[in-house]
Image (spheres, rainbow, N blue to C red):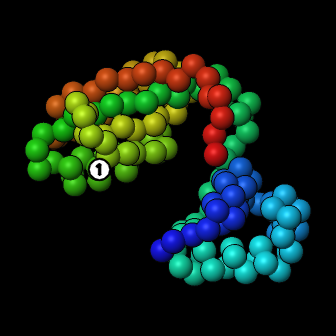
Amino acid sequence: MKISATDEQLLSLLRENARASTAQIARRLNLSRTTVQSRIERLEREGVISGYTVRVREDFERGHIRAHIMIAIHPKQMTSVVAALRAMPELRLLHSVSGAYDLIAVGVVPSVDAMDLLTDRIGAIEGVERTTSSIVLSTKFER
């Protein structure tokens, strides 16, 4: 489905704060509240917006370790590896990517020791060939 530049702006505002009122969004987009509500309903109905989620305050997880974990897997093992990774609540996100690695996961844990254990658990999954981790030092922005 093709969406307009206004719809893109609307999605960007919802990514910043999905709980913003339609009136607040309407003011930022210079549209009527009814128009914004109609656009949101259409985007939901057409599956562009597939759901909403919770983001916690940065200071809530202050001190937690966040890392991008690159994962190389053996051929034909993608389905079982993804299923095993999905069962790990410390993993917030999983991307399938091109290049030297097949997957990139984002893990969030309370300590370096816990990150070490998490990467060991990932490496022990049948079908995982190797992992490499990069600790996130700071997040400059998130949408």
Give the image location of residue 66, x and y in percent: 52, 28
Residue in view at x 45 percent, y 45 percent: 93
Residue 121: tell me if it is visible: no
Rendered view: 43 above or below 87? below
Residue at (29, 53) in percent of width and height = 83
Name of the residue lying farthest toward the left? 75
x 69%, y 43%: residue:
56
Q: Nearer the viewer, residue 32 or 14?
A: 32
Q: Secondary structure at mark 1?
A: helix
Q: Position of residue 131 (x, y in %)?
A: 28, 27
Q: Position of residue 109 (x, y in %)?
A: 52, 30
Residue 72 in the image: state x and y as whole percent.
22, 34
Kindly identify the amino acid type of the residue bearing the numbered disc 1: Val
Give the residue at mark 1: 82
Q: Nearer the viewer, residue 140 or 135?
A: 140
The residue under the point 71% across, 33% down is 58
